Amino acid sequence: MDLKSPLPRFQQRRQIGREGGHSQERELLEIIIGLISSTVIAWFAHRRGALSASGAWAAILVGTMTFGFGEWTWGLVLIAFFALSTLLSRYRQVDKRELAEKFAKGARRDMGQVLANGGLGAFIALLYFFYPRSPLLAAFLGSMATVNADTWATEVGVLSRDPPRLITTGRRVPPGTSGGMTALGTTASALGALVMGVLAYVLMYVEAVLSGDIALQLSWIVPITLFSGFLGSLFDSLLGATVQGIFYCAKCEVDTEKELHGCGLRTSHVRGWRWLNNDMVNFFSSLWGALVAIALWGVIATR
């Protein structure tokens, strides 16, 4: 594939149809399918306790935009992230219960968490609808790989038997500390990014074959998704160790991301920017992953 071309050939054909006015019905159908699919998944997730009511509404919005304005492959990548992250959050919940009070939110995702993790991807899908270019595809995959890598790092890393070390200084910190890293969590982060890359490649390979295209043009997907997702996850840890708002509960004598601790006591602000909560950190990290993916795509495209 000539990466200097704006799109793979099967995507170029879709754009030609759009410009010729022949695909409006198809695009409307994709939006409707996205709305129906997102509603069904959000309703089921809400019933299972994976989403709050506000999280379900946000999931419908994010899912509809991603399915309707991106490609069907984009929507499946989003679903895979949600499904895998939900399963990991429920894995060995008893072992994670002691650390739950350190985190701002639990496994039941609300609107803020949904928008922080999937909002940027949905916005990129909207941009792609009007300006379909491969760098935007790379940005979408970079953002999704970042949030997946960060989720895997957190959910698996807290189970490490070795104490985490702060990313900035390397000193040992208590498990669950923002910015703390373990070998297990770091490995899980890289694996989470890799899974997103492999999944995206397989899905787009299938789309290319069904469209009569070749898959060699997609060879950049796995390495770019892997590196951008992993670097985005490291950026998340860096923000957590430096500028994320951290509070202290005098009653429980623990640091936490919550302004109101689970014990009912209002905490005191000890470091970082008070407004920069975990949702904002996740959003900025996904943005960083998207920008890294665009930069890597630019390097490969100019070779």
Image: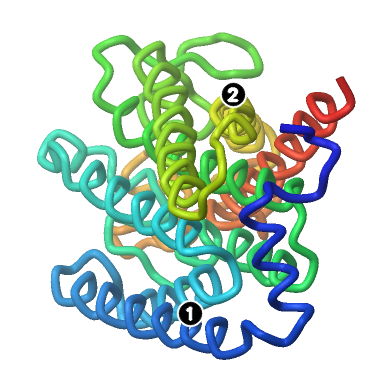
Q: Is residue 26 above or below residue 121?
A: below
On-image quarter of the C terminus: top right
Tell which residue pokes out farthest to the front in this image: 212
Q: Nearer the viewer, residue 28 or 140?
A: 28
Q: Is residue 233 above or below residue 85?
A: above
At 60% from the left and 47% from the top, the residue drawn is 143
Count residues near mark 2 (Cα–Cα under 10 Å), then give few for <14, some for 14-19, many for 20+.
some
What residue does disc 2 label?
223
At 41% from the left and 39% from the top, the residue drawn is 202
Tell which residue pokes out farthest to the right in this image: 302
Q: Give the percent coordinates (x, y) of residue 208.
A: 51, 47
Are the residues flagged by discs 2 and 1 in contact, CB closer than 8 Å?
A: no
Residue 39: quadrant of the picture: bottom left
Q: Is residue 121 visible?
A: yes
Looking at numbered disc 2 in the image, what kind of residue is underneath it? Answer: Pro
Which element type, helix, strand or loop, lies under badge 1? helix
Q: Is residue 247 visible?
A: no
* Mark number, residue 152: none
Q: Give the percent coordinates (x, y) of residue 134.
A: 73, 48
Residue 1: quadrant of the picture: top right
Cα distance between the residues tagged 2 and 1:
29 Å
Q: Is residue 151 above or below residue 283?
A: above
Q: Give the percent coordinates (x, y) of residue 116.
A: 55, 60
What residue does disc 1 label?
30
Q: Nearer the viewer, residue 281 or 67?
A: 67
Looking at numbered disc 1 in the image, what kind of residue is underneath it? Answer: Glu
Count residues near mark 1 (Cα–Cα under 10 Å), then give few for <14, some for 14-19, many for 20+.
many
Q: Is residue 213 above or below residue 229?
A: below
Q: Nearer the viewer, mark 2 or mark 1?
A: 1
